[in-house]
Amino acid sequence: MAAAGLWRRTGRLLEMAPARGGWPRLYSTSPAFADVLRLPQKQLTKIVYPLRELAQYLVTDTGPGLLEQRLFDPSLEDIARAESVFEATARNRVEYLSSAVRLDHAPSLQQPEVCFIGRSNVGKSSLIKALFSLAPDVEVRVSKKPGHTKKMNFFKVGKYFTLVDMPGYGYRAPEDFVDMVEAYLKERKNLKRTFLLVDSVIGITKVDNIAIEMCEEFALPYVMVLTKIDKSSKGYLLKQVLQIQKFVNTQTQGCFPQLFPISAVTYSGVHLLKCFIADITGNLK
Ligand code: GDP
């Protein structure tokens, strides 16, 4: 299996004492997971388990374990195994497949699918790019202008699953959203999970609420991903996360109760999210 080499390397690294010294630099390219494993414990936790790191700052009167309900809490070994699913090799082709403006133009595929939805500018392209950092040939457009993604873009991740980048909603894109996203979410048979991105700096907006209501109405299993966590102070981020967590606990049915905070700049939370995707698509055996 392709993971064997990586696993051997990772296994060795796990036995090594963590490297001394500070965070070498803010990652702007993919940190291989092996490099992450070399980090001192505190920094490793921050990059791999951002929610766990954040929970340390909770004062006890915030309520019983609001952030402690970690349903998905894989080991570093599991996370290392999941990396190989996303790593492009001769035997594991990770590639852009096609784009579609309507559901009936979407490729007919058997393998499990996950999709990413979110308001324009929420950081969707940046996150998808980060997820594909071990497949540098995959081109994911990251635009400076809001609202550029007007199509559903399909990416094949080997024999494992398909990832779909949906058009951003909110800014100049309501028609696309209704025509494409709604039909897709409602009818796509092999859709395993929807990842709904919310900007952690801004919180849940009116347009995010429309998307949440849609997921709820269609009884979709979905997951809330909080983007751009590198932009806030720890205190502000904690406040936002607690607020959104409370919303998820009290106002939603279909949302996975664990939030996934991420940064496409520092890669914080990205490895964990990859592991979650590998798991829910049945590829983390
Ligand atoms: P999309 O419209 O949802 O695809 O959003 P993009 O990925 O194009 O990102 C919108 C803007 O937010 C761009 O200027 C990105 O550089 C920035 N951005 C995206 N993700 C992050 C992040 O994790 N941290 C920070 N600081 N900026 C981000």
Image (spheres, rainbow, N blue to C red):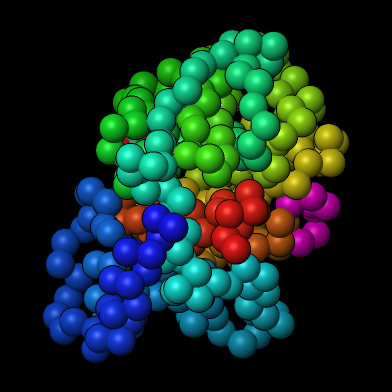
Q: For this rendering, which residue is in front, 75 or 203?
A: 75
The picture places residue 283, in percent across and down from the top left corner, at 58, 54
Q: Residue at x 26, y 58 (%)?
A: 31
Image position of 29 (left or right of 100):
left
Q: Is residue 97 visible?
A: yes
The image quarter containing residue 53 is bottom left
Q: For this rendering, which residue is in front, 255 or 91?
A: 91
Where 75 sits versus 257, above or below?
A: below
Quarter in which the C terminus is drawn? bottom right
Q: Residue at x 59, y 11 (%)?
A: 101
The image quarter containing residue 145 is top left
The picture places residue 216, in percent across and down from the top left corner, at 81, 41
On whether residue 80 falls in the magenta region, the answer is no
The picture places residue 242, in percent across and down from the top left corner, at 61, 65
How many numbered marks does the figure carry? Answer: 0
Q: Is residue 202 visible?
A: no
Q: Residue at x 76, y 61 (%)?
A: 249
Image position of 183 (left or right of 167):
right
Image position of 234 (left or right of 226):
left
Q: Residue at x 73, y 52 (%)?
A: 255
Q: For this rendering, which residue is in front, 270 or 209?
A: 270
Quarter in which the N terminus is drawn? bottom left
- Where ligand 1 lies, by quadrant? top left
The picture places residue 215, in percent across and down from the top left corner, at 76, 38
Highlighted magenta segment, given as a residue range: 249-255
On whether residue 254 falls in the magenta region, the answer is yes
Q: For this rendering, which residue is in front, 216 or 59?
A: 216
Where 104 sits versus 129, above or below?
A: above
